Image (cartoon, coloured by chain):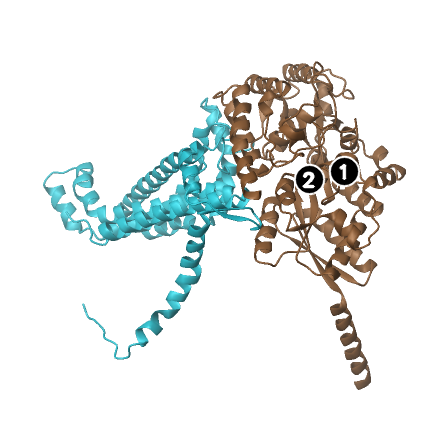
Amino acid sequence: MIRTTLVGAMALAASVSMAQAKTTITWWHAMGGELGQKLDQIVADYNKSQDKFKVVATYKGSYPQTMTAAIAAFRAKKQPDIVQVFEVGTGTMMAAKGAVYPVYKLMKDMGEPFDPNGFLKAVVGYYTDSQGNMLSMPFNSSTPIMYYNKDAFKKAGLDPNQPPKTWGELVADSKQIMKSGAAKCGFTSGWISWIQAENFSAWHNQPIGTEDNGFGGLGARLEFGKDKALVKHWANLAEWQKEGIFKYGGPVGGNDAPPMFYSGDCAIYMNSSASRAGVLANTKGKFEVGYGMLPYYADVKGAPQNTIIGGATLWVLRGHDKAHYKGVASFLSYLSSAKVQADWSQFSGYLPITQAAYKLGQEQGFYAKNPGSDVGIKEITLNPPTANSKGLRFGNYVQVRDVIDTQFQKLLAGNETAQQALDNVDTNGNKLIEQFQKANQ
Amino acid sequence: MKRIFFRNKFLPYLLIAPQMVVTIIFFLWPAGEAVLQSFQREDAFGLHTTWVGLANYRALFQDPAYIYSLQVTVVFTIGVTALALISALLLALAVDRTTKAGSTYTTLLVWPYAVAPAVVGVLWWFLFNPTIGLMPYLLSLVGYHWDHALKGDDAMILVIISAAWPQVSYNFLFFVAGLKSIPASMREAAAIDGAGPVKRFFTITLPLLSPTTFFLVVVNFVYAMFATFPVIDATTQGGPADATNILVYKVYQDGFVGLNLGSSAAQSVVLLAIVIVLTVIQFRFIERRIEY
């Protein structure tokens, strides 16, 4: 009895000291709900796969909350090793040169094998510096796609397997659907700023700002108002809203848009490819969902180009010792491995970020079995990204998105024309960008 | 008034020390930091800090968005205060007239005060949701198309109702107490002299309630200006087109979402000044009591 207790105590002591020998890597993220559980599982698998490091993942709330928490922690010198930051925070993170440890440099310094060419160009393009170095590690990236109600299409006498390709077709289909009584409205959209402005311009190969949409440096400024295709599109949206063809789902992510599609009120819905799981869960038993690429204007030269991504990447923060960074490098390698990426993207609807993960998914037959799950990846890889469709990089962009929402609301309320609204986006947005430039020079 | 003298010179300081420590750490220190930051321009991580003097304040008062936010705050504050006070007064008068069930009504009417502000916001957000809400449906029956996602006035009405609702309970309690302290004999005398209920209310009840009312006006002003953040965040997030972006919410948006610390700090200092003014008003006028 005494012996077993003694052995037990020794074993316990040994395990405790072993646990202490492990270096703890902290990761702050913004993945709640089912995504958070999946993430915890990935972390647990990593911790089991080796015995040198222990990753501790902590949910910190929404994207802005997580980013703010990490920044506050950095100021108090209590920063995590890794923090997940959404794409519009990229400009802020990139400018904080003393605070972030660029991923390409980390991998090189730690001697971790790392092949930047294995990643999808359209994904990493958003997160590389002007020399093409990867500054952060993509983790969850998505792109907007179009969802539509096949039953409503059928009821209106339209081909349910033929989603509208152009805006002209979309409006014609919408009118027919509304006239036939198959649905009350034609379409709605989440994320006006991301989908109906930023992605719209990339998809039509038009710039929204100077210096390659901000990739060239802090001196870049917005030029939404000069994108004539976008001005026309916004004018159309306002018109369609009056006619009831388009229904507005609210600012930022557009919280009211999903219920309008789920309830069958609107027959077409544009939102992130990562919304697929939610769409399926909420329309199950109600109607069949079809998938299509974002519509484009046939008369704009260069359209469709390719869409740009949203979602988040992992940034490594400075101020820790080398042992930590060894672990961070090893963990990031694990996260971007084909197996983990394929599993994560298939579960969540986010894009597979490496060629290998995409290929693995194809070999597994995932995309064939799950129609619509590869629309996003087809959109971002439709054409090699141009300077207009690589993404965008402006400081204070979280607030600029608020400006876009505000001006869009003024347009819909009839207080401004599309040209005025987009010109105001430029004027007000550039003030914020200028402040950012001054604070970071 | 009885005054107490301490023989030991240090004892009084020792006795107030805990309170002072709390005040300094939790109030004076952060307020000082905010004042300091309002004169600086700094990036989010605190890597570069430059002293810019009054530039943040100048930019603030030249910014049409800030002036607009000030106007919105005035409308919102007056709206919340008026709605919360008038409905509370009506309810209190009603309870004052009931003889039997008064205490039951009082208990029930106080309940909303216990509801957490964020829950209050979500509750009204559901009721007024343009897609799934009950109120837009009812309003559509009378021909009104409710849409607080697009119509600034609708959004303002929504946040005023949401913010006033829990405050009604609070005001109600004070009014009930205030009404109890008005001698019944005065009203009876007036009734005998031939004054109707409306006349009695305006000539006797309301003037005698004025100390309570004035106190509540200040408290409600402070509540509407500074404690309504969760309601706004849960309902409109300041939109549409900044129509409900009150000053407190703007501080949060610019500072915590936008990471523009200098401007956010300057806005906090402006709010600090407003609180000081309101406090002075309260101490100078209310503590002296208005008498008729």
Whether callout 1 and callout 2 share a subunit is answered: yes
Left or right side of A392 for A19: right
Check disc 2 and give the amino acid type.
Gly
Residue A330 x/y as whole percent: 79, 55
Query: Residue A309: which quarter of the image?
Result: top right
Residue B122 x/y as whole percent: 51, 42
Secondary structure under the numbered disc 1 in the rendered image: loop
Numbered label attached to residue A311: 2
Secondary structure under the numbered disc 2 in the rendered image: strand
Quarter of the image that includes the C terminus of chain A: top right
Query: Label 2 marks which chain's residue?
Result: A
Instruction: Give the total number of marks visible in the rendering.
Output: 2
Marks 1/2: CA–CA distance: 10 Å
Check disc 1 and give the amino acid type.
Leu
Label 2 near label 1: C-beta < 8 Å? yes
Residue B278 x/y as whole percent: 31, 48
Is residue B101 at all visible to an observer of this figure?
no
- Say which colour chain A has: brown
Asked if residue A6 is positioned above or below residue A389 in the image, the reply reads below
Quarter of the image that includes the N terminus of chain A: bottom right
What residue is disc 1 on?
A351
Q: Give the residue displayed 11% in from the left and 38% down from the top.
A: B194
Spot the residue most to the right.
A363
Query: Which numbered disc, 1 or 2, marks the residue that appears first in the sequence?
Result: 2
Crowding at dot 1, Cα within 10 Å, few <14 / some 14-19 / many 20+, comes out as: many
Query: Residue A226: which quarter of the image?
Result: top right
Closer to the camera in the image, B212 or B264? B264
Which chain has been coloured cyan in this picture? B
Left or right side of B159 for A295: right
